[in-house]
Image (cartoon, grey):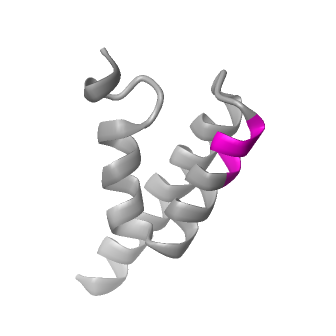
Amino acid sequence: MGKILSLIILVLDILAIIKIVQSGASTGEKILWVILVLVLPVVGLIIWALLGPGGPAKK
């Protein structure tokens, strides 16, 4: 079960990084978001989903 969860988190983090790089945010913002997702994989992904470009807090 732990390996499956880890794989899901890895895939979601990779997808988030791809979306971050493709976003219209400034280069500095992109770098900060990517670092956050890499350093804190689960928490960073949740924060990005909520506060990142296109997240519910931005609408």
- Residue 8 seen from this side: no
Q: Is residue 30 magenta?
A: yes
Q: Position of residue 18 (x, y in %)?
A: 64, 42
Instruction: Identify the magenta region.
Output: 27-31
Quarter-of-image position of residue 51: top left
On the rendered structure, is 6 left or right of 23? Answer: left
**Quadrant in which the C terminus appears:** top left
- Residue 30 seen from this side: yes
On the rendered structure, is 24 left or right of 42? Answer: right
**Residue at 41% across, 60% down:** 44
Q: Position of residue 38 (x, y in %)?
A: 57, 68
**Quadrant in which the N terminus appears:** bottom left
Residue 47 drawn above or below residue 55? below
Of the pair 2 and 16, the residue shown nearer to us: 16
Q: Position of residue 24 (x, y in %)?
A: 66, 21
For the view shown, which residue lies furthest in the right direction? Answer: 27
What is the chief secondary structure element of the magenta stretch?
A: helix
